Image (spheres, rainbow, N blue to C red):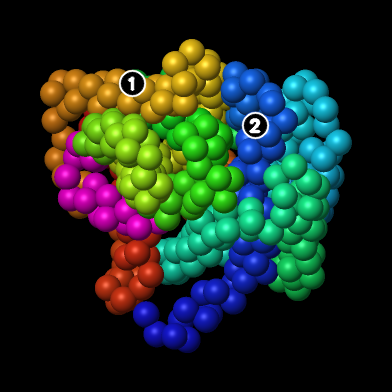
């Protein structure tokens, strides 16, 4: 794609992307710092699991409530209000002394962050058209993914037991306000109400619904507990933070190849295959842990992230293949809620298992979930064959219901609008344009 075209696309979203990048650095650092701080303060692993589950509950609640707030006050005021709340909550973590306090603050941070991502994703979607959607979404995803991936490096800037890192997180959240509140571009239109169609979607695309729920059970748990796992197997706090970096780095590297593959075969085969591979990599992580080799462990975590963290986007693409175009927005919203429910439940049994058999229990749990998902989807494939998709993957993250607006509704129009640019644009890095879904195919 010509450089001028990249600059034009980025010019449409630079302010919200700058705010999102700062926010993701803060969010990534918070995800690492919280479990390490609780571990240092002697909170039981099951208690850490309940705090992680509280975030899932808050996030699911925020996904439903955020569109209501945005409709009432607009995107900029909603972002400013929620960023202020998130910053105050980050400061609140420096004063909390009880498990109930940790749970309450983490739930509140989940609500605030879900609302912030709703504003960000809705804004990016509003700036995207059929002609530039791939470029816009790709630039946004690249910036935020890199920010999330590099955030663990900030853990060395302060003490886990001190307040400095929480102050840094609060400062970054406040700084994210500047590019958003100072923008002179017009605000996007208010989001519509969240309409959920989970029962209907389960009948149409059960592999996608079960996949999104299983991913929530597994991925949210590992992201929340990985730093504690690292410390408990003998890593320093800084080394444990590298596990988070490896997870996000693996996801960034493998998301496009797996999405590209799913464009040319039955997506359920990719879901089943990647799930089975995730279960095998769980065994690799346990082996690397037994070898007490930090390098091997970081590489294994990177491979795990490249597999497990990529399943959700393929589940979304699979579901969108099967529903009518007007159902794509509620479809993606419904899958996000399934993911959030999984994220709310998953940390509790996983951390209980860790308490019973040691830190290795985390990946015995993940291996069981991944194996069950692979078996379920394989059974669905055997019951109903599908033709290859021939395009349609779009890399959507589980951040807010507004990501539904990023998915093209009419693949044929999108292809015509961008057919002269498809070979050279960054959308080849993170996704392709979705085709018109076929409601007659059973998932």
Q: Where does residue 209 sit, x and y in percent of width and height? A: 39, 27
User: Quick check: can you spot residue 294?
Assistant: yes
Q: Residue at x 57, y 64 (%)?
A: 127
Sequence order check, earlier mark of 1 and 2: 2
The span shown in magenta is 251-270
Q: Where does residue 104 sit, x and y in percent of width and height? A: 77, 26
Q: Residue at x 27, y 50 (%)?
A: 258
Q: Residue at x 31, y 76 (%)?
A: 424
User: Quick check: can you spot residue 410?
Assistant: no
Q: Where does residue 246 sit, x and y in percent of width and height? A: 43, 51
Find numbered disc 1 in the image and state the secondary structure of the residue it sits on.
helix
Q: Quadrant of residue 340?
A: top right
Between circles 1 and 2, the one closer to the viewer is 2
Q: Quadrant of residue 98?
A: top right
Q: Nearer the viewer, residue 410 or 377?
A: 377
Q: Quadrant of the N terminus?
A: bottom left
Circle 1: is it few (<14), some (14-19), or many (20+) Cα within 10 Å?
A: some
Q: Is residue 108 above or below residue 189?
A: above
The image shows a total of numbered marks equal to 2
- Left/right of residue 59 with respect to residue 323 in the rendered view: right
On residue 368, which mark appears?
Answer: 1
Q: Is residue 180 above or below residue 63?
A: below
On residue 39, which mark appears?
Answer: 2
Q: Quadrant of residue 439?
A: top left
């Amino acid at each position: 794609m010509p450089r001028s075209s990249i600059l034009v696309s980025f010019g449409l979203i630079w302010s919200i992307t700058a705010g999102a990048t700062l926010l993701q650095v803060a969010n990534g650092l918070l995800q690492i710092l919280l479990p390490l701080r609780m571990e240092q303060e002697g909170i039981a692993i099951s208690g850490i699991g309940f705090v992680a589950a509280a975030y899932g509950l808050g996030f699911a609640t925020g996904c439903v409530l955020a569109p209501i707030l945005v409709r009432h006050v607009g995107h900029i005021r909603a972002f400013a209000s929620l960023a202020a709340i998130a910053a105050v909550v980050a400061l609140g973590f420096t004063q909390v002394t009880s498990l109930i306090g940790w749970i309450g603050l983490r739930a509140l941070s989940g609500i605030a962050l879900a609302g912030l991502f709703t504003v960000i994703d809705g804004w990016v979607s509003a700036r995207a058209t059929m002609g530039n959607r791939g470029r816009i979404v790709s630039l946004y995803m690249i910036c935020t993914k890199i920010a999330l991936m590099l955030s663990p490096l900030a853990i060395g800037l302060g003490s886990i037991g001190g307040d400095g890192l929480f102050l840094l997180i609060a400062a970054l959240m406040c700084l994210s306000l500047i590019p958003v509140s100072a923008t002179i571009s017009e605000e996007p239109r208010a989001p519509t109400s969240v309409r959920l169609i989970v029962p209907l979607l389960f009948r149409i695309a059960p592999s996608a619904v079960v996949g999104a729920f299983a991913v929530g059970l597994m991925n949210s748990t590992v992201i929340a507990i990985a730093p504690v796992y690292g410390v408990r197997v003998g890593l320093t706090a800084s080394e444990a933070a590298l596990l988070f970096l490896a997870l996000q780095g693996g996801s960034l590297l493998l998301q496009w190849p797996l999405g590209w593959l799913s464009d040319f075969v039955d997506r359920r085969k990719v879901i089943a295959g990647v799930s089975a591979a995730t279960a095998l990599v769980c065994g690799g992580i346990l082996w690397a842990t037994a070898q007490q080799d930090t390098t091997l462990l970081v590489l294994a975590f990177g491979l795990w992230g490249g597999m497990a963290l990529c399943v959700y986007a393929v589940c979304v693409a699979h579901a969108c293949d099967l529903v009518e175009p007007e159902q794509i927005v509620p479809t993606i919203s419904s899958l996000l809620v399934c993911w959030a429910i999984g994220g709310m439940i998953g940390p509790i049994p996983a951390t209980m298992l860790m308490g019973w058999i040691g830190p290795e229990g985390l990946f015995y749990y993940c291996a069981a979930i991944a194996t069950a998902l692979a078996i379920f989807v394989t059974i669905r494939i055997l019951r109903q064959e599908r033709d290859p998709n021939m395009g349609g993957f779009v890399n959507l993250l589980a951040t807010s219901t507004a990501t539904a607006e990023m998915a093209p509704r009419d693949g044929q129009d999108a292809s015509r609008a961008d057919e002269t640019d498809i070979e050279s644009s960054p959308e080849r890095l993170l996704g392709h344009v979705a085709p018109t879904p076929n409601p007659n195919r059973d998932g």
